[in-house]
Image (cartoon, helix red, strand yellow):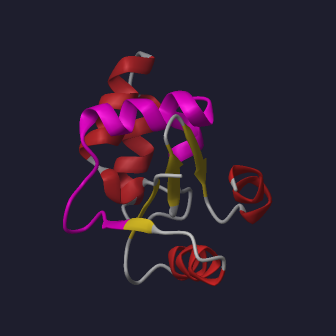
Amino acid sequence: MNIQIFGTNKCFDTKKAQRWFKERGVRFQMIDLKQKPMSRGEFDNVCRAVGGWESLIDPKAKDQATLTLLRYLAGEEAKADKLYENQQLLRTPIVRNGRQATVGYCPEVWQGWE
């Protein structure tokens, strides 16, 4: 397994995900999105794995103005581009294992990865 956890150090669910993998002895790479945002390729792969960019949005994000703008942009590609540019709107943790990915705390899915 090649696990990557995208999140922030202040996110409670990201900490829970890290603890879940540590308790099972699974090695992972933690990427703090505030220090190093996802590359475009990573973002596109995660979007495909979770069923589209809509699944990545955190409706409780602090930047409500950009979240509102995202709703009213024309075209799916423009919306995905705006979300990529504003990764503070992503729901965390985003856990990746190769071509598979989850958004949020999903131990029931991760169990099947072992």
| Residue 4 occupies quadrant | bottom left
- Residue that appears at 28% across and 48% down: 38
Query: Magenta span has 32?
Result: yes
The residue at the far top in this view is 75
Q: Position of residue 15 (x, y in %)?
A: 52, 81
- Residue that appears at 37% across and 81% down: 9
Q: Position of residue 21 (x, y in %)?
A: 59, 73
| Residue 19 occupies quadrant | bottom right
User: Can the viewer see residue 57 in this picture?
Assistant: no
38 with respect to 59 (left or right): left
Q: Which residue is at the front of the view, 24 or 48? A: 24
Tell me how many marks there are: 0
Give the vertical position of 113 relative to 106 (above or below): above
What stretch of residues is rendered in magenta?
Answer: 30-57
Give the vertical position of 91 relative to 80 (above or below): below
Give the vertical position of 103 relative to 29 (above or below): above
| Residue 28 occupies quadrant | bottom left
Give the vertical position of 38 relative to 54 (above or below): below
Q: Which residue is at the front of the view, 57 or 49? A: 49
User: Can the viewer see residue 15 in this picture?
Assistant: yes
7 with respect to 12 (left or right): left
- Residue that appears at 20% across and 60% down: 36
Q: Position of residue 77 (x, y in %)?
A: 37, 19
Query: Magenta span has 102?
Result: no
Position of the C terminus by quadrant = bottom right
Q: Which residue is at the front of the view, 104 or 59? A: 104
- Residue that appears at 56% across and 36% down: 54
Q: Position of residue 105 (x, y in %)?
A: 66, 66
Q: Which residue is at the front of the view, 86 or 6? A: 6
13 with respect to 114 (left or right): left
